[in-house]
Amino acid sequence: MNIALIHDHLNQIGGAEKVLKSLTELYPKAPIFTLLYNPRIKNEFFPASEVIGSFLNKKKTAPKLFKWFLPLMPTAVESYNLKGYDLIVSDSSAFSKGVITDIDALHICYCHTPTRYLWSDSWEYIVEMRESNALVKKILPFLLTYLRLWDFQAAQRVDAFVANSYFVSRRIKRFYHRDSTVIYPPVDTHLFSLQKHKKNYFVIMSRLRPYKRVDLAIEAFNEMRLPLVVIGSGNEEKYLRKKANKNITFIGEISDNKKKNDIIGHARAFIHPQEEDFGIAAVEAMACGTPVIAYKKGGALETIIEGQTGIFFEDQTWESLANAVIHFKDNEYNYSLIKDRAERFNAHHFKEQMSAFVRSKYDENKKDIDSDSFESQRA
């Protein structure tokens, strides 16, 4: 198979990039096509891969003003030269599924979610961007309508969808009218060891952005005056630090896995206040043997077993979260069982299932092409 990998953009490291990393390990010779990339991330995480940026990558302002280039992104994705590739695997939460391939090529899309700001979170995105300036306020709704039409059309080009959870599979069906196969994303559980000794604090690890709802945790722990450790950074960090009382400690990003394991592993519980498509951070916490207190929606319903690996709170309010924390009982949990649950989502399982799925679809596609060729000769 002559394979190409397609990724939205390589300017940060998150769940989508961890999927891409596993795909490069499955297909080490495959080049990565992406809208733009950070050379540091490329060199650190994908040193052996050829990374090919779109024409946006040549624009110096694109990484900093990424959202302002939205109107150009469909054209940029469609400009990739994929001639000669007979298998394309896109790793997409936005534009990469829209590539144009050879007529006989097979395109499999690993979908993290239908583009959030076009579908499920479009209203929140408009409200957030309206604060930019008056021009954005006027043109953004029309731009999103255009992009939504393109996004739906782009989804019809995909031969087979893989969803990262049943929650996302339902979204794909709802917004794209396509069926999908669920293969959970890879979690590097091998980087986390079981910690049975818990200390008197709770922990949250997240990018500090509005939709992650870290503000709920801040409000809840402000009221309860219980110790909370916040791992992560983002554009809400200044606001959240100002909002937090002295019982809440911010420690920023942690690149040292041993230190991360130590902090998360010794926490009484991991706080997960957001609705996630899957929720890798919650599974990483379970890989340390740490139970999770999660908002009862999204991918958390597929990873957390209530009463065994954590508990849920019903409403996305600080009061509901605080009530769950108050009723949380440490002595009810078997930390070894929690870690065993996390191992069901490790990278080995992902690679095994993804490889088998790709091979199966590739063989089906090749059989169909050969059959069409035979029928044309008969005619």
Image (cartoon, rainbow, N blue to C red):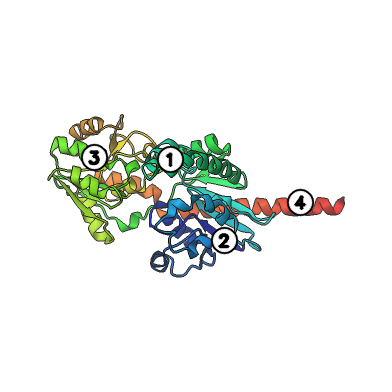
Residue 192's place in the image compared with 320, above or below, is: below
**Lower sequence index among marks 3 and 2:** 2
Q: Secondary structure at mark 3?
A: helix
- Spatial CA span between label 2 and label 1: 38 Å
Residue in the image at 40% along x and 52% along y: 15
- Spatial CA span between label 3 and label 2: 41 Å
Q: Which residue is the site of mark 4?
A: 371
The label nearer to you, 4 versus 3, is 3
Q: Secondary structure at mark 2?
A: strand
Residue nearer the viewer, 203 or 208: 208
The label nearer to you, 3 versus 2, is 3
* Residue 54 appears in view: no
- Spatial CA span between label 3 and label 1: 31 Å
Q: Which mark is residue 4?
A: 2
**Lower sequence index among marks 4 and 3:** 3
Residue in the image at 44% along x and 64% along y: 60
Would you identify the image quadrant in which residue 103 lies?
A: bottom right
> Does residue 9 appear to the left or right of 282 in the view shown?
right
Q: Which mark is residue 364?
A: none
- Spatial CA span between label 4 and label 1: 53 Å
Residue in the image at 51% along x and 68% along y: 50
Category of crowding for the residue at label 4, using alpha-carbon neighbours closer than 10 angstroms: few (below 14), some (14–19), many (at least 20): few
Q: Which residue is the site of mark 1?
A: 137
The label nearer to you, 4 versus 2, is 2
Q: Which mark is residue 217?
A: 3
Would you identify the image quadrant in which residue 300 lies?
A: top left
Category of crowding for the residue at label 1, using alpha-carbon neighbours closer than 10 angstroms: few (below 14), some (14–19), many (at least 20): some
> Residue 54 placed where, x, y %?
53, 61
